[in-house]
Image (spheres, helix red, strand yellow):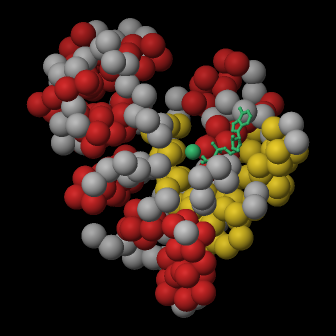
Amino acid sequence: MERENRHIVNDHAPVISISGLFKSFGELPVLQGIDLNLYEGENIAILGKSGSGKSVLIKMIVGLLLPDKGLVTVLGQNVAALNRKALDRLRLHIGFSFQNSALYDSMNVFQNLAFPLTMNVKHLNRLQVTRAVEEALEAVGLRDKIREMPSDLSGGQRKRIGIARTLILKPKIMLYDEPTSGLDPVTSADIIELINLVQSQYHTSSLIITHDLTCAKNTANRIAMLSKGKFSKIGSFDELFVTDDDQLKAFFNYNFL
Ligand code: ADP
Ligand code: MG
């Protein structure tokens, strides 16, 4: 399952471009000069300890928070400059897999998946909606759960359904916030496999926020280490952790001590 850790050489404009990004909350500086380009077809993992600003960064990419300074462009558009309607249109291309899955507990799996589709794509008949839901469930291997309620699913299944719900709109970009957190190693391995499958079947480019070095190693072309509001290192897994033993030690000290 291990991925080839190669850099994607790409002359095209990046799908996400972040430059000189700063964000504070009151007196608390969170992001202090972030630069990152995500190229088409690339997966970048962002590692950083709890509270380092990983979710804040993702929220700026989808326009839920605005930068104090700096620029975030997604698919060539300056996110902070978009009006509500343009932002909604841009978000259709971004699949956001939340830290807590965020399924609607009062709706069954079918309804959870059909909801974003019927909200955003008009004039679909019942059969078209059903087909789209079945296709997304097929992709995550849970077609048989279509009538289940979220409360009857395991943590891993809820994550998969959350990912299926974003796939239904065929996003160009996937943002995964802690996709394997709280999962046992076997279930984590399934989610890692799913992230790679989504990339190859749906041709997505992804940012994967994670604490999990195994997840980063097996999904990402590049890994970015967020520390003190900046990316202290960006490179392939081998560059960061195999050729630089001190960096590996630092990672474990930093996350687990
Ligand atoms: P993580 O890296 O664990 O995802 P976050 O990005 O969620 O961390 O948060 C980074 C810091 O910013 C934390 O100290 C958090 O309390 C603070 N923070 C996040 N969102 C807000 C907000 N809307 N208002 C004030 N502080 C916030
Ligand atoms: Mg977070």
Look at the picture and state if 127 lies above or below 42: above
Q: Position of residue 88 (x, y in %)?
A: 61, 23
| Horizontal relation, residue 228 to residue 110: left or right | right
Look at the picture and state if 152 lies above or below 108: below
> Would residue 143 be visible to someone looking at this image?
yes
| Horizontal relation, residue 207 to residue 54: left or right | left
Q: Position of residue 231 (x, y in %)?
A: 71, 65
| Horizontal relation, residue 183 to residue 17: left or right | left
At horizontal 49% and vertical 56% (from top left) the residue drawn is: 210
Q: Position of residue 97 (x, y in %)?
A: 45, 39
At horizontal 72% and vertical 44% (from top left) the residue drawn is: 73
Look at the picture and state if 101 lies above or below 218: above
| Horizontal relation, residue 177 to residue 201: left or right | right
Q: Position of residue 165 (x, y in %)?
A: 36, 30
The image quadrant of residue 58 is top right
Residue farthest along the left direction in this orientation: 144
In-front residue for pair 191/182? 182
At horizontal 30% and vertical 35% (from top left) the residue drawn is: 158
The image quadrant of residue 140 is top left
Ligand 2 location (quadrant): top right
At horizontal 28% and vertical 54% (from top left) the residue drawn is: 184
